[in-house]
Amino acid sequence: MSDDEGGEEYLFKIVIIGDSAVGKSNLLSRYARNEFNPHSKATIGVEFQTQSMEIDGKEVKAQIWDTAGQERFRAVTSAYYRGAVGALVVYDISRRNTFDNVGRWLDELKTHSNTTVAQMLVGNKRDLENIREVSIEEGASLAEAEGLFFMETSALDSTNVKKAFEMVIREIYSNVSRKVLNSDTYKAELSLNRVSLVNSDGSKQSKGYTSCCSR
Ligand SMILES: Nc1nc2c(ncn2[C@@H]2O[C@H](COP(=O)(O)OP(=O)(O)O)[C@@H](O)[C@H]2O)c(=O)[nH]1
Ligand SMILES: [Mg+2]
């Protein structure tokens, strides 16, 4: 490895989906800026926030996309999903209808993605125990049936927020490293996005981003 290669960098696109007012924007602001907004209106203008973590001594950046409120009109565009390699599918444990709609969101995600997407089902507002309408067991069993990770979170009191995002990021990393090593088609796909590839002997082809985020 030459001296100027400080290590590979990875950039992963993650989308947050789910019904309106389940807490998507607050999950992101809690994770990215440790902020919570009790009066948040529909997100305006913000496309994504980037957050870094280290895995295996490598800097891994997650570009996390938040809807701008289009979900209220069932109008989340395919551009929103394009290139996503991770997704948090969020419902509100105090509103059963948001849980009932999870299947729709999963279908939409499937329709718009052409690669493996690391997915986590997130039951948010876990602090609202006294008005809970969806049990932990129901969440867990839906996740199991659909093959998703599962976590209950609270953007309000921070419970499991970092954990949820980081688990998805780690899963993406593991998906990508396995594929980069094993699959030629995925290699080709990634190289179109100017990726740093790992050869089958473990050496690197080029330095750059593992970009999963072209728009
Ligand atoms: N009690 C509680 N309220 C929350 C939580 N997360 C978000 N909220 C509130 O739920 C409302 C909708 O949140 P928002 O993040 O805008 O939802 P989005 O439409 O899915 O982006 C706001 O009033 C938030 O303050 C949470 O974990 N607990
Ligand atoms: Mg929002």
Image (tube, grey):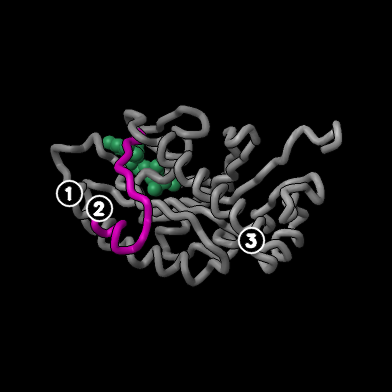
Say above or below: 215 vs 2.
below
| Residue bearing the label numbered 3 | 182
Residue 45 seen anywhere in this rendered image of the structure = no
The disc label shown at residue 89, or none: none
Give the residue furthest to the bottom. 111
The reply to whether the C-beta atoms of the residues labelled 2 and 1 are less than 8 Å apart is yes
Q: Going by the image, does 100 lie left or right of 195?
A: left
Say above or below: 46 vs 212.
above
N-term-proximal mark, 3 vs 1: 1
What's drawn in magenta, residue-wise?
139-155
Kindly tell me whether mark 2's CB lies below 8 Å from ligand 1. no
Say above or below: 154 vs 169.
above
Of 123 and 10, nearer the camera is 10
| Residue bearing the label numbered 1 | 135
Of 118 and 204, nearer the camera is 204
- Could you tell me which residue is drawn at 57 percent across and 47 percent down? 173
The disc label shown at residue 139, or none: 2
Taking the magenta stretch, the answer to whether it contains residue 124 is: no
Q: Estimate the spatial distance between the alpha carbons at disc 3 and disc 1, rounded to whole Å.
A: 40 Å
Assign a secondary structure to mark 3: helix
Crowd rating for badge 3 (residues with CA inside 10 Å; few <14, some 14–19, many 20+): some
